[in-house]
Image: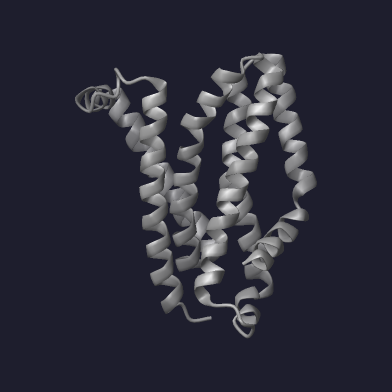
Amino acid sequence: MKGLILKDLLNMKQQWKVYLLVIVAWFVLSIFNDNYAFFGSIMVMLVILLPMTSMAYDDKVGWEHYALTMPVSRKDLMFSRYLILLLIALCAGVISVAGGFLISRNLQENIMFMLVLMPLGLMMGCVLLPIMFRFGVEKGRYVFLGIFILLVVAFLLMKRQGLLIELASSWGLLTVSQEMLALLLWGAALVVFLASVLVSGGIYRRKDF
């Protein structure tokens, strides 16, 4: 499993300079705007983009065909993607909080912001992985994009009709503290993570390489 994770990190190494440039650019813009949320948001997006980059390289060279000739199980290949997702989320969270401290000097607020935002990125990543396993990277990214656009449109329509506030009020979300909101989101992220692993496991077992 360690070898699979190392392989993913080496895959992404080819794009590190690009992503580092993006992070630095966003950091500078956040300083000028005095807006930590701007910087934190791009770090969460990297949690989704980096695993996709690694899978794209693997698809390009037919990695799974070669990997299955070695003493590596399909379960290991599948679950290593989730481990790299968690590792990237951890690194992105640390970088985000550290960068946010340089921007706003409010460590507690930065940590709380990331504790609320990061589970949303993890849930999106957990939705993305089964789609990639099922349709491949090229088709999968369009399927995911389509789902994402539909969710955004639904969100905007509900907000415009006032349904979003009504729904949040009925669930008692308007009165919960940030700490409780973070706890609820991490609980939801755990459920989505476990469900995603089960779905991906089923897809990977039946997948014909």
Q: Nearer the viewer, residue 143 or 26?
A: 26
Image coordinates for residue 19, horizontal then vertical, percent:
73, 43
**Color encoding of the figure:** one colour
Q: Residue furthest bottom?
A: 69
The location of residue 39, given as percent across then percent down, is 64, 27
Horizontal relation, residue 52 to residue 208: left or right: right
Provide residue 60's location: percent of width, then percent of height. 67, 69
Residue at point 61%, 15% (across, down): 106
Q: Is residue 17 left or right of residue 109?
A: right
Q: Quadrant of the N terminus?
A: bottom right
Query: Where 164 sits versus 197, above or below?
Result: above
Quadrant of res 167: top left
When the figure is inspected, residue 62 is found, relative to residue 109, above or below; the finding is below
Q: Where is 202 relative to 36, above or below?
A: below
Q: Nearer the viewer, residue 86 or 124?
A: 86
Percent position of residue 78, x then y: 52, 67
Horizontally, residue 205 falls left or right of residue 76, namely: left
Q: Tag count in the figure? A: 0
- Please identify the residue farthest to the left as the structure is shown: 170
Asked whether 174 or 49 is in front, the reply is 174
Residue located at (76% from left, 40% from top): 20
Residue at (72, 34) in percent of width and height: 23
Residue at 80% in and 45% down:
17
